[in-house]
Image (spheres, rainbow, N blue to C red):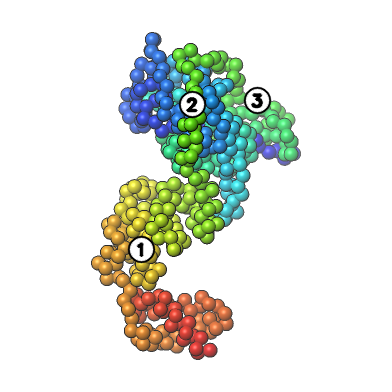
Amino acid sequence: MKFEAVIGLEVHVQLKTRSKVFASVGVGFGEEPNTLTDPVIMGLPGVLPVLNHEAVRQAVRAGLILGSEIPEVCKWDRKQYFYPDSPKNYQLTQYDEPVCVGGAVEIELPGPARNIMGEHRWVRLTRAHLEEDVGKLTHAGDYSLVDYNRAGTPLLEIVTEPDLYSSAEAVAFLNALRMLLTEGGVSDCDMEKGQMRCDANISVRPAGSSTLNSRTEIKNLNSITGVRQAIDYEIRRQTGVYAAGGQVVQETRRWDAEGGLTTSMRGKEEAHDYRYFPDPDLLPVRFPTQEVEALRTALPERVFDRQRRYQETLDLPYTLTSVICYDFGLARYFEEALAVYGENPKALANYIANELQRERGAVEGEGLLPLEDVAMRPADLAELVRLIDTGTLTKHAARTVFVEMFQTGEGAAAVADRLGLKAEPQDSGALEAICRDVIAANPVPAAQFREGNAKAINAYVGPIMKATQGKANPREIHEILARLVAASD
């Protein structure tokens, strides 16, 4: 019997605020343990929480980005549980009246090849609610250490419907969600810093069935690799249980990355196990309708909408849009360059997706050089492409100019002048003589051109550029070549 998986995700995203959601102490990462705490975070007697308005505003903004409904009122509840990562022994969260309801996220499934667009579809959301994060436990031998620096950080929990059917779809969802929220300025979604974590609810059923079998929840998956491997393992495990005539037990499991397997933690809790009740210290929140609409009008263009626009209106191929559109910084860089020189968007996109990315990666250090540290401005790149299009710079010379611009921040014309790389007017008779000699030395491309292969004469350009030390105008070369080859027919 064939089985299929049904997957729902609970994604926890830390929101970008300067202070915590119910306390004035700041948020941060990498600080000395237990230095970002105060009496509210530690749950000391007599202290009261005070709501951070910016956390609610960021949650609403996230909901609008995700297409959620924003109810007129949301409220706060206490989720009761005893665990060392929560000093109060309860978590302030939202149970039956969350800040965001519904919504959907467009995902792109992997294509048949890396340079081909995959299938797109929408994954429905159940809700997104705002809550406080908990501390971090570090297990060492027979004891554990707890750091409360993360406790109280505003956390948005985004819950999907069971609309995912493989680890590849789950990864596609997380990638799409990360792009949307980082571009919207809601969160940095850095999984290495714990700013985005995932719980996966997984069940399997006979292929074609519409029933939902018992599920297991895998807690605290904190990397894309972990999500993929944990889901794949759990699908295999549950399929094996059913194939052997057994039943899957509803439970919570943890992912053991070193062992490559999931292990049982505890029985799966239900809502009544947490004894939710409205928090007596926090009033319900009425978020003004006019503020919701102001946030809605300021939303950025969604990633896949921008990609479709680039492909349809600018005629950019998927290979370029999949690099530029999936990185908000690159998209903004491209848009600024395009605003300066919009005659050749494909050339601008090529330089950004290839040369710029290559130079950023060549700088010493880990990963890519941050865009804000790149000396070459978008307007400088636009100037470089304009000089190529007008024949002032050859493409060969432009490569040298680009590297120098990246390293120094100088403008294209200034670099070309300093290095003596601008194309120089050629004596038309001398240039034509060079073209005749090159054609005579290799008549095959000329014959192919006359047979209808218009690109065949490109084989002559390299030798001609070498003969002119790279300073001839490529446009003039092509005009002379086309005339000479056609005349010799």
Image quadrant occupied by the N terminus: top right
What is the spatial separation of the Cα atoms under label 2 and label 3, in whole angstroms? 42 Å
Q: Residue at x 74, y 36 (%)?
A: 209
10 Å neighbourhood of mark 1: few (<14), some, or many (≥20)? many
Residue 363, label in figure:
none
10 Å neighbourhood of mark 3: few (<14), some, or many (≥20)? some
Q: Which residue is mark 2?
A: 287
Q: Residue at x 49, y 23 (%)?
A: 286
Q: Residue at x 40, y 75 (%)?
A: 474
Q: Which residue is mark 3?
A: 249
What is the spatial separation of the Cα atoms under label 2 and label 1, in whole angstroms? 48 Å
Q: Position of residue 448 (x, y in %)?
A: 54, 81
Q: Looking at the image, is mark 3 or mark 1 earlier in the sequence? A: 3
User: Looking at numbered disc 1 in the image, what kind of residue is underneath it?
Assistant: Leu
Can residue 256 be seen here? The reply is: no
Local SS, label 1: helix
User: Looking at numbered disc 3 in the image, what kind of residue is underneath it?
Assistant: Val
- In the depicted view, which residue is nearer to us: 372 or 280? 280
Q: Residue at x 41, y 24 (%)?
A: 52
User: Looking at numbered disc 2 in the image, what kind of residue is underneath it?
Assistant: Phe
Q: Is residue 159 left or right of residue 431?
A: right
Q: Residue furthest top?
A: 46
Q: Which residue is mark 1?
A: 384
Q: Position of residue 91 (x, y in %)?
A: 48, 19
What is the spatial separation of the Cα atoms under label 3 and label 1, in whole angstroms? 63 Å
